[in-house]
Amino acid sequence: MKDNHLADLAALEYAVNQLLEQLQALKAENLQLKEQLVSSQAKSESLHAEKQHLQEDYERLKLAKMLDLGTDEVKDARQRVDSLIRKVDRCISLIKA
């Protein structure tokens, strides 16, 4: 009976040691995962800030392109539109005649 208790005690001690080893391994893994989380969050914030900066640059570039239209380009475009309108008017008058 005494040997039976000693065997049970040894088995319990072994099981406790296994659990302690698992606990240490899980603590190390948890610490590593927390570090990865912090790193990922910092990278995410950095990428978000970069995205915001690029969007602002894009909006400024679009505005600059719109303002960059010279008066000569606008004048040429108006002349082309006027020419097309005259051609359409001639075609309409020919159809009516």
Image (cartoon, helix red, strand yellow):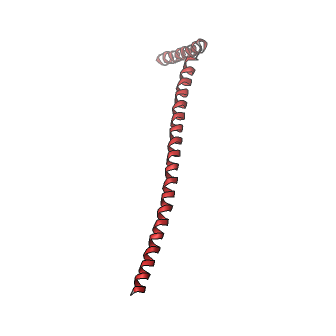
Between 83 and 9, the residue placed more toward the observer is 9
Looking at the figure, which quarter contains the N terminus? bottom left
Name, please, the residue furthest toward the front. 2
| Residue 2 spot, x, y in % from top left | 40, 86
Please say if 49 is above or below 69: below
Please say if 46 is above or below 88: below
| Residue 6 spot, x, y in % from top left | 43, 82
Q: Residue at x 53, y 45 (%)?
A: 39
Name, please, the residue furthest toward the left. 1
Please say if 7 is above or below 65: below
Please say if 46 is above or below 92: below
Between 31 and 95, the residue placed more toward the observer is 31
Between 44 and 51, the residue placed more toward the observer is 44
Q: Residue at x 40, y 82 (%)?
A: 5
Between 95 and 47, the residue placed more toward the observer is 47
| Residue 97 spot, x, y in % from top left | 48, 15
Q: Residue at x 52, y 53 (%)?
A: 32
Query: Quarter of the image holding residue 72?
Result: top right
Query: Quarter of the image holding residue 84?
Result: top right
| Residue 61 spot, x, y in % from top left | 56, 24
Q: Residue at x 52, y 49 (%)?
A: 35
